[in-house]
Amino acid sequence: MKKIMIIEDDVGIRRELQDLLLHAGYQVESVDDFEHALEVLLKSQADLLLMDINIPYLNGELLLKEFRKKSDTPVIMLTSRTSELDEVLSMTYGADDYIIKPYNPTILLLRIQNIFKRAEGNHYQSFYKDVEVLPSKGILKRGNEELELTKNEMIIFQYLLNHLGTIVTRDELMADLWNNEEYINDNALTVNISRLRNKLASFGYEEIIETRKGQGYILL
């Protein structure tokens, strides 16, 4: 599970971000000790930072500049400042993205996903139980056996796998498909889920994608 660190001194916004990210299946931590924020970030082993510019002690831009001297962890600047200079400084100091408040929650999640996908690269692979997941080949592999998935089926399976044991909503799945330039509607998602389940069952994995009524799906 990916870990995201929030650097935001506004308690209300921080809680809002925490709820959004936890619901999306991320592990979330936040900085409370802004005086020693750099040390906290370097020890956090977070996969991505969401950083406000207007924070106490060392502002976000200077904190980013110092952080970049020792880490290449992705950073999204999330700020109410609309000055082009702030955006230029942030990108110059090493920000991976810059989002102005008030933010659109769906867009923010898509931006986060994009950064993780770029970081993982096209050769990303993983495992589910004893099955190797090879997105670049569109297959699941177990020993000499291979199961071919369509592009949409692979995107859905990967998203569920990345949130293993966590309920994923239909909206989240469709947003991930849209982010991969696969524009499908609600009915098409149902069809793809059904086909994926049938293929997995034929491969010896029955009922591993469970429907949670009114909530979404969970990969067991």
Image (spheres, rainbow, N blue to C red):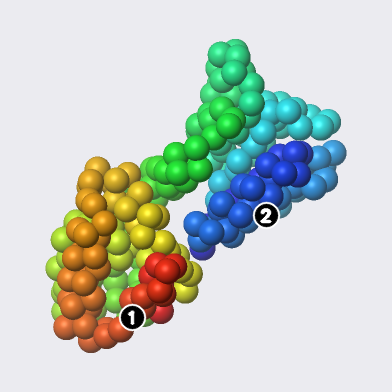
Q: Position of residue 172 (x, y in %)?
A: 40, 55
Check disc 1 and give the amino acid type: Ile
Q: Is 26 left or right of 188, judged from the image as shown?
A: right
What residue does disc 1 label? Answer: 208
Say which of marks 1 and 2 sits in front. Answer: 1
In the picture, the disc for residue 61 is: none
- Residue at x 24%, y 43% (from the top left corner): 181
Determine if residue 40 is in view: yes
Foreground residue among 141 and 60: 60
Determine if residue 7 is in view: no
Indicate the secondary structure of the residue bearing disc 1. Answer: loop
Q: CA distance from mark 1 to mark 2?
A: 30 Å
- Residue at x 22%, y 47% (from the top left corner): 182
Indicate the secondary structure of the residue bearing disc 2. Answer: strand
Q: Quadrant of residue 158?
A: bottom left
Q: Is 75 left or right of 119, judged from the image as shown?
A: right
Foreground residue among 216 and 78: 216
Check disc 2 and give the amino acid type: Glu
Q: Position of residue 28 (x, y in %)?
A: 62, 56
Q: Quadrant of residue 12?
A: top right
Quadrant of the image containing the C terminus: bottom left
Q: Position of residue 97 (x, y in %)?
A: 50, 32
What residue does disc 2 label? Answer: 29
Whether residue 103 is situated above or below residue 186 in the rendered picture: above
N-terminal of the pair, mark 1 or mark 2, is 2
